[in-house]
Amino acid sequence: MAETDSPTNPNGASTQNPIIANNKPKVVVIMGATGSGKSRLAIDLSSHFPIEIINADSMQVYQGLDVLTNKVAIRDQKGVPHHLLGTISPIVEFTAKDFRDNAIALIDDITSRNHLPVIVGGTNYYIQALVSRFLLNDSLGDTDESCLDENNGAKQPHIHVTVDTENFSYSYDSLKELDPVAANRIHPNDHRKICQYLNLYASCGVLPSKYLQETTMENWGNADSLRYNCCFICVDASLPVIDKYVEQRVDQMVESGLLREVHDIFNPNADYSRGLRQAIGVREFEDFLKAYLSEGNSSMEASISNCSSDQVSADTYVERLKENVNAILSTSGENLLKQLLQDAIDKVKLNTRRLVRRQKRRLIRLQTLFGWKIHYVDATECLSCLSEESWTAKVVEPSIQIIKSYFDKDTSSVPDFNATTGTKGLKLMERDLWTQHICKACGNKVLRGAYEWEQHKQGRSHRKKVCRLRKSGVSGLDEY
């Protein structure tokens, strides 16, 4: 890390109190999809700024599954302090509120040393909870729309809660009956969000749609409503390139012992909706491990278990399990274990690709709907050719310039949404976040809000499908 007490401006002159501006601590937030290189960039920035990193990945905060969650190994951290990385018990639920409370204390501590806090992660609801002054109550802390005043319940003692929580059904039908607008906003199988919305009503007696739309969501677009003076940097890459990269990374994880990690925490009766077991790559291997442990391969497990610790080290265990996995994958002909294992690996890749798309959509929402000024650096070339020179020129150097420019400004790096649109007085609740659109041309795909709908209609895949349908004489495509 650079041996300096404070960041410098582009002219090399030391700035006075550089980590504080407009009475708000300055923080750099590095965002982006999984596999884009966020952690790598943050560590590289330590050669130019006195930084400390706060992890904002909801799975990397937990102890364990280092390979699966792709934690930065200590040898690769280059002496840069990392906070909230592998420190939380894997059996607890570390909510967005928990992250916010921990990160606020860390930022205060880091800035007191005149160091620059760098928030790094792809869990955008963690970042939203931290930088916004508004947050839903504890039970709702990890929803994408976490933007209500955390003290609002205390400010409204007149609300009379009539819900009988013991007999209350936490189902989509219950939400739809209670609040059709909120139900229309989410997928019927999104059980977590359903519970979050119903918990909101159960705790304070206010309809989720009314609370989310009317109370404080308009404040998300105002720079003054953010807790910190933020410099947002997104490491971006084209979907085809990042898809290929993350698929290769999954194969490398399998080779590096992913199965051993998953095997160690495997429990067929476990709750996969809490703690570390939510991570992509855990549940996908459940069917394989059940079959693997119930068939003849259990003899290998027994032989290892019966050996003393001197005879079989952790490394030996990994190698034996890896040999078994490789042997299963290389088996010729039809084989149940081979099929289950390959299916599991394919599911991990598929779900990771889906995660990448969700992360990208949320970043677009933060920029377009909430007015966050996000600086994009393109890592497409770097991921496709894995060139160190390309990484430095295309990602690291532009990021350095963005941060130096950020330190030259006394005003907030996150502008008012109204200023960026030129429409004074526009409220977020008027931007059509809640209308549900269904694309029949794409197999009744559900799009949420006018922005997602317009983006979908402009997509290449959608336009191709509409074109084919029109050529085949299908009517009713005027809205496309």
Image (tube, helix red, strand yellow):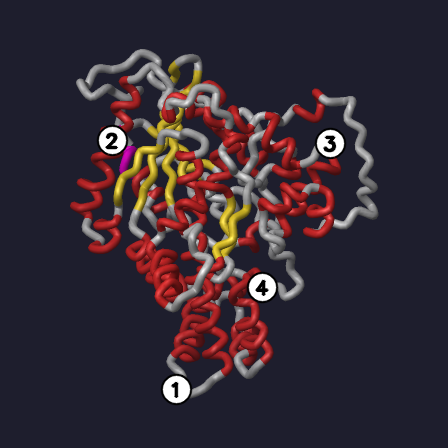
Separation of marks 1 and 3 at Cα, in angstroms: 60 Å
Residue at disc 1, secondary structure: loop
The residue indicated by pointer 1 is: 332
- Residue 317 place in picture, x, y as percent: 46, 68
* Residue that mark 2 sits on: 400
Residue 119 located left or right of residue 291: left
What range of the chain is rendered magenta?
43-48
**Eyeballing the image, is 118 above or below 442?**
above
Which residue in the protein does label 4 denote? 266
Which mark's residue is nearer the viewer, 1 or 3? 3
In this rendering, the label closer to the viewer, 2 or 4: 2
Mark 3 = which residue?
A: 204
**Residue 375 visible (yes or no):** yes
Asked whether 39 or 173 is in front, the reply is 173
Mark 3 / mark 2, whichever is N-terminal: 3
Label 1 or label 2, whichever comes before in sequence order: 1
